Image (cartoon, grey):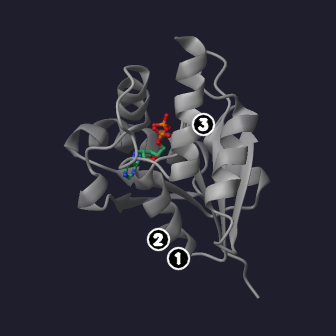
Amino acid sequence: MINRIAVYPGSFDPVTFGHLDIIKRASEMVDTLIVAVLVNKAKTPLFSAEERVNMLRSVTKDIGNVRVESFSGLSVDFARRQGAEFLVRGLRAITDFEYELQMAQTNRIMAPEIDTIFLTTNLKYAYLSSTTVREVASYGGDISRFVPKEIEELVEAKYRGKR
Ligand code: ADP
């Protein structure tokens, strides 16, 4: 039997309803979906990789075929090591398109056996990004419409600590 595996890479700093929507839909398309938290040494994230992995595990615990891991380096190398056939990315707006297309084409040259699947965002979440969530929360704004309750509490606690 074939086990179709896809990797959904990203920063997820923090995970939002937009990411969760992509995770749910992608998980229905494959046997195993690996949500992969990128450890990017060049950026200082709000949440450590371990915290981001734990948050993602918690909000995806009811989806049976989702696994959450962290990785550093190239997404295609991680995908290859996991035996994945696909990378999954979400497309919100035309502004995502140019960058995503370039990435997908580069990845395809590096790993022709791995295809990128783009899922278009649910319009409800098209405006939503982790950056917006961090920005709103940093000024004490309400982020309850952007992230699950447990994530809201963790984000707010981070900024309380910073103020
Ligand atoms: P990255 O730093 O790789 O862009 P993100 O965590 O911001 O990581 O996003 C990971 C993936 O999720 C990207 O493909 C991005 O386009 C997608 N994504 C982000 N926000 C949303 C959203 N609101 N709806 C759908 N997809 C989204």
Residue 29 marker = 1
* SS at circle 2: helix
**Which residue in the rendered view is the most extreme toward the left?**
94
Instruction: Name the side, left or right, on which 85 lies relative to 103.
Output: right
Contact, mark 1 vs mark 2 (Cβ under 8 Å): yes
Q: Residue at coordinates 74% horizontally, 48% vertically from top-left?
A: 69
**Kind of residue at badge 1:** Met
List the residue tagged with mark 3.
154
Residue 132: % across, % down:
35, 31
**Which residue in the rendered view is the most extreme toward the top?**
163
Q: Residue 36, relative to residue 31: is it above or below?
A: above
Q: Work out how far the residue at label 3 is from the one at label 2, CA to CA, in angstroms.
A: 25 Å
Q: Nearer the viewer, residue 119 or 84?
A: 119
Sequence order check, earlier mark of 3 and 2: 2
* SS at circle 3: helix
Contact, mark 3 vs mark 2 (Cβ under 8 Å): no
Q: Work out how far the residue at label 1 is from the one at label 2, CA to CA, in angstroms.
A: 7 Å
List the residue tagged with mark 2.
25
**Which residue in the rendered view is the most extreme toward the bottom?**
1
Residue 56: % across, % down:
64, 51
* SS at circle 1: loop
Sequence order check, earlier mark of 1 and 3: 1
Q: Is residue 72 visible?
A: no
- Number of numbered discs visible in the structure rendering: 3
Q: Quadrant of ligand 1?
A: top left
Crowding near pointer 2: few (<14 within 10 Å), some, many (20+)? few
Q: Residue 21, relative to residue 92: is it above or below?
A: below
